[in-house]
Image: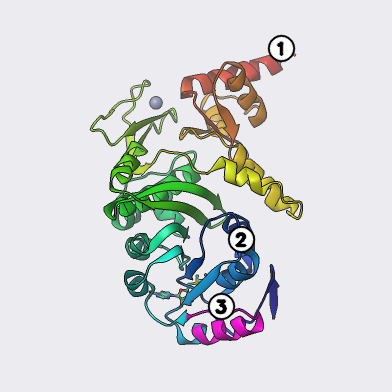
Amino acid sequence: MIREGKALIVTDGVFYNPRMKFCRDLDMLIFSKLDAKNYLDSLAASGVRGIRAALEAEYQPIFNDRDKRAVEVIRRNLSLNGVEAEVYNTDAAVLMRERNFDHVDVDPFGSPVEFIDSACYSAKKYLSVTATDTAALCGSATLAGLRKYSAFAVKTDVYPEIGVRMLIGFIAREATRYEKHVRVVASWSKEHYYRVHIKLKKSASLSGKVYEKIGYIFYCPRCLAKYVSLMDGSTRETCNCKERLFMLGPLWTGELKDANLLESLLNDTQLSNPLKSFLTRIVQEADSPLAYNIQQLASRLGLRAPKTEEVIYFLQEIGYEASGTHYCGYCIKTSAGVEEVRRAITELVRGYKRS
Ligand SMILES: C[S@@+](CC[C@H](N)C(=O)[O-])C[C@H]1O[C@@H](n2cnc3c(N)ncnc32)[C@H](O)[C@@H]1O
Ligand SMILES: [Zn+2]
């Protein structure tokens, strides 16, 4: 028997990944702030997430798994925890076509792509998605990204940034087909997976506005420059350094979090230190879609990398928005262009030499 959060779980050979406890812990904190009641744990396995949602976020969960053994285990876990809920044993995509839920969770093995259309159709208020096919999303597996997400990427110096934006961009494009507007509640990249929580609102007029935040990042493989453009027909072929640019996307160029909501979670005095520091890094991240890897930029300049915090401070001092990132200790997000970041690195390293 496994204790996780307030739940007690038996697995009996059904899928359960203890490494995802951190993710579920953070999910429960977020769920407790959302205005939703019924919650579909569409690929539930042992049911751990939905049971925790009932016990820790006052949700009314509904469970589903295609595997009969999983359904038996879910029923045992429900009675073990004194939770009453409906349990389905069907294909998640079919169920989501048949019923609407306030909040839908899609937590598959590998890619969520086959469930996104029906999940966008089904979810009334919130949609949570896990993806472990990070190679397809971040540009390590370009062809898989095209096949699954109809989007192009190559691996960049800040690949988790691109991957999460590709995933949200795909979900947002699917949602607008059902006249749903999207806002990102939270999103992160950790270890082998990406996790996103999205707020949906049915509105034909608002859903078109989603395209004000979907576009492309033009990326220079030579000097690591990045330029953002929306899906407005504009394009850019060459970098200021004369290299041909890669056009990555379509992807989400908007904000990756609801900073106020996440900040309010930091007031919880029960918060464990790892959760607190992870959440703090997410809250403090700049909203700019431009991210740079300081080590890689410095090595291209033939310099040793200065401290990430010093680059951030330097950029802030000359008037730019700048922050660290939650996914890489030597990456930054900033409104500054690559020339300014290079200047920051060069001046900081020269400063060290003088002192
Ligand atoms: C990664 S596990 C889910 C883990 C679970 N959410 C957790 O937090 O522990 C994926 C589950 O999806 C189920 N599954 C796979 N394809 C499905 C489908 N098309 N419809 C319903 N369930 C499916 C599998 O049987 C498996 O139990
Ligand atoms: Zn360039």
Asked where in the image residue 27 lies, by quadrant, the reply is: bottom right
Q: Up-down: is 310 above or below 188?
A: above
- Which one is nearer the viewer's eye here, 229 or 342? 229
For badge 2, the amino acid type reads: Met
Q: Is residue 59 left or right of residue 123?
A: right
Q: How far separated are the C-alphas under marks 2 and 1?
A: 50 Å
Instruction: Looking at the image, tell me whether mark 1 or mark 3 is earlier in sequence order.
Output: 3
Read off the magenta span.
71-86
Q: Residue 28 — which label?
A: 2
Q: Which residue is mark 3?
A: 46
Q: Please, what secondary structure does the residue beneath circle 1 have? A: helix
Mark 2: few/some/many CA within 10 Å (<14, 14-19, 20+) = many
Residue position marked by numbered label 1 in the rendering: 354
Residue 276 picture location, percent across and down: 70, 48
Please state which of the two labelled residues, at mark 1 or mark 3, is closer to the viewer: 3
Tell me which numbered mark, 2 or 1, is placed earlier along the sequence.
2
